[in-house]
Amino acid sequence: METMVRKTGVRNTTKSRLRRWITSPSSINLMYLPALLLFVLFIYYPFFQGIKISFTNWDGYSQLYRYIGWDNYKRMLSDHRIGTVIMNTLIYGIGSTILQNAIGLAYALLLNYHIRGKTIIRTIVYLPVIVSPLVMGYIWYFFFQYNGGALNDIILLFRDKPINLLADTQLNVWIITLVNTYQFLGVAMIIFLAGLQSISKDYYEAAEMDGASGLSKFRNITLPLLAPAITINIVLNLIGGLKLFDVITALTNGGPGYASASLSTMIYQLYFAHQDAGYAAALGNFMFLLISVIGLTSLYLLRKKEVSS
């Protein structure tokens, strides 16, 4: 009996010590260690390796390379393709952000009312999000393609020649932007819908008693209280659009030439097609800086707007 009591006491003491260790701040820090190691291995190490490679003439495959200093960054300043590619990247980022937020907010406002079939509408709008962007790009490629495309099959009913929209340098960038908008506006819709449903109806009832119009309620109640959702959507859409890759690759592969290329697709082509890993790494660092500046600046301004509103 005494032995059993002793064993029970030891077991309870061990459990209490283990409980105290688990709940102590030092043990919690140790719990972070596996995640931190994975983060360092897959985020920090490749990032600093990319910075290192950008100062070399490495081709991406050979074990031999030499350091060339800032030559890759100086080369960016004289590359005639960079201006077009940066402009395309900004169009994909800013254009998609404007369209996704405008259309997503319109859908959210519609679905916030008690209408029939709103669950089906919400599912249909959100459904493209779960499709791979590369697959989505190929689906739309078969719609827009010159030979045998669904759109040109319709056009041939009214004229003799098909239209090569994906080769039109004035249109293909906007087609890609629209496809990206179509795929991800469901995310914006869901975030806006969550924001709308968190707004108390008391505000609208008080405004109606004061004789406020629908537009006035939207401007003075809905938009200010929806500011956090607007911030989330704009920042997410900007980052996603600025690093757009899959849809461009599927629809035009950045062509003709670099007319529809983004920074992401240009980096891919430089590395794999031209074996110019050093220059690709320099361009990747520039892309990281561009997205960071735009993303953090927009986040700061929008957060500031939230506080002021």
Image: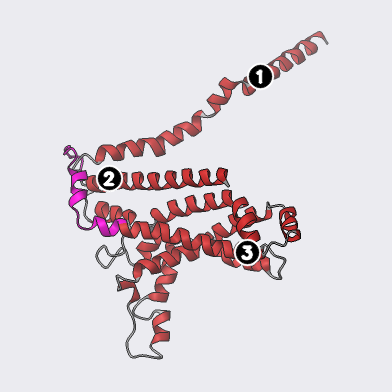
Q: Is residue 172 left or right of residue 191?
A: left
Query: On screen, 162 above or below 10?
Result: below
For residue 127, which numbered disc appears in the image?
none
In this rendering, which labeled residue sits more in front, label 1 or label 2?
2
For residue 215, which numbered disc appears in the image?
3
User: Can residue 172 be seen?
Assistant: yes
Query: On screen, 52 above or below 184?
Result: above
For residue 20, which numbered disc appears in the image?
1
In this rendering, which labeled residue sits more in front, label 1 or label 3?
3
Q: Residues within 10 Å of mark 3 (few under 14, many from 20)?
A: few
Q: Is residue 26 left or right of residue 250?
A: right
Query: As shown in the figure, which amino acid type bears the numbered disc 2?
Result: Ala
Check if residue 74 falls in the magenta segment: yes
Residue 268 horizontal/vertical position (percent):
30, 54
Quarter of the image where the N terminus is located: top right
Residue at the image position 22 percent from the left and 39 percent from the top: 55
Q: Work out whether residue 105 or residue 249 is closer to the camera in this orientation and state it.
A: 105
Query: As shown in the figure, which amino acid type bears the numbered disc 3?
Result: Leu
User: Can residue 131 be seen?
Assistant: no
Q: Which residues are magenta?
A: 61-86
Q: Tell me, yes or no, whether the two marked residues, 1 and 3, touch with CB atoms within 8 Å.
A: no
Outermost residue on the front side: it is: 210
Element on which disc 1 rests: helix
Q: Work out whether residue 189 or residue 49 is closer to the camera in this orientation and state it.
A: 189
Outermost residue on the top side: it is: 2
Location of mark 2 (residue): 281
Residue at the image position 68 percent from the left and 55 percent from the top: 197
Q: Residues within 10 Å of mark 1 (few under 14, many from 20)?
A: few
Residue 135 horizontal/vertical position (percent):
44, 64
